[in-house]
Amino acid sequence: MEKRTKEKGAGEIMESLKTKVLEQLALAKQASRKTGLLRTEEKNEALALIAEQLLADEANILAANEQDLARAEADGQPASYLDRLRLTPARIRDLVDSLEQLIRLEDPVGQLIDSWTRPNGLVMEQIRVPLGVIGMVYEARPNVTVDAAAIALKTGNSIVLRGSHSAVQSNLALTASIRSALSKSAVPADAVQYLPYKEHASVDLLCSANGLVDVIIPRGGAGLIQRVLQQSSVPVLETGVGNCHIFVDQSAHYDMAEAIVLNAKTSRPAVCNAAETLLLHREWPLDRQHALLARLLAAGVELRACEQTRALHSDLAEQLKTATEQDWDTEFSALVMAVRTVDSLNDALEHIQRHSTGHSEAIVSEDRASAERFLAAVDATTVYHNASTRFTDGGEFGFGAEIGISTQKLHARGPMGLPALTSYKYVVRGTGQIR
């Protein structure tokens, strides 16, 4: 009897959750019919109102964020996680700046992509249109709440947000500010929905809401992305894990190599475009290799090195941890870096092919032929010659705010700016033609 009572109770909770989630999705769907027809001026006015509201609500937002941070610290979350979770006045100002940049960007909706006239006189036009309702599933970073909502609205979409429960108070406060601003604009407030439910079933409901949701975008670690890919019947626009490599070729200039590697690893180690593996050409002078490894160690980077690297630098061996096979496939998101010595460009390419997640890969080399071969052979969203992987970012590409970095090849690849949140339709103009 007790077991049946518990099962009945659990069933009722699930039914209640399903009802609430589907109600929010239906509101977003209804709102999308209006957002897709709004003029650019109306959407830009809404974004400006959101920027004003965020500044007005800063104290409330930071207080909510403190609740999330206190809970995360009590749960023993690492410093890198807390950094992703933390909001500050400067970071709120950054969000406002990104909104202002977004306002200045060209609106892709309604753009004429192509046009042509058929022999029968039919005029064919290919025109950009919104995707519709976007489901956004993400972890930790509350800034995504604002960035994703803003990009969705600029492109005439509605968005349903589901962040991790660790950031729920921050996300609710940010969403409340966004919806408050929208209530004063031509954009319906229901175009932005937040699912505050801690049950993972809310993600499953979002990912299976065919007819109400047009695309799902997961943004976070490998576990989250794989769960969404496996569970979703709604099309998924996949953002990828960043296991990024830097290959220092035998001709690399030392000062350049040091600056690039240190920047790619230490400037912000918790982000997906940070470098996780350093590949050193065996013929690059040993004194330069030694100096680079010592510089990384001095910067607080934990190095996990292959046996060949440890043998070549025996005086550093006690500071170089032994790399495991798992390390070559790990996105550390921290001040940790795997190091491998390779005998040739071919060995570097083979390692990257085996372990890369297809995000961002770099070569430091003064040999043009080697660099061009690397750029052509590596299959990733972005490949670099003599530059840091940290540039794989919508803002750095000139796209304004981004909704994520896609590592798949269909629809969008790399940093996803405004055009990535649109599709297109064909408009055919005739004079009475029949077939």
Image (cartoon, rainbow, N blue to C red):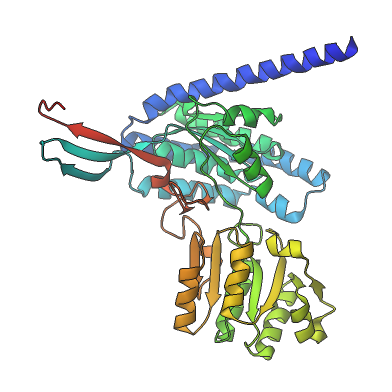
Q: Residue at x 38, y 46 (%)?
A: 419
Based on the displayed image, in which of its 4 quarters is residue 343 positioned? bottom right
> Would residue 371 be found to the left or right of residue 13 on screen?
left
In the picture shown, does residue 8 fall above or below 43? Answer: above
Q: Position of residue 314 (x, y in %)?
A: 81, 85
In the picture shown, does residue 332 fall above or below 86? Answer: below
Residue 86 visible, this orientation: no
> Would residue 269 be found to the left or right of residue 10 on screen?
left
Q: Residue at x 73, y 39 (%)?
A: 67
Based on the displayed image, in which of its 4 quarters is residue 208 positioned? top right
- The quadrant of the rendering that contains the C terminus is top left
Q: Position of residue 278 (x, y in %)?
A: 65, 73
Residue 354 visible, this orientation: yes
Q: Residue at x 12, y 28 (%)?
A: 433
In the picture shown, does residue 292 fall above or below 17? Answer: below
Q: Position of residue 138 (x, y in %)?
A: 61, 41
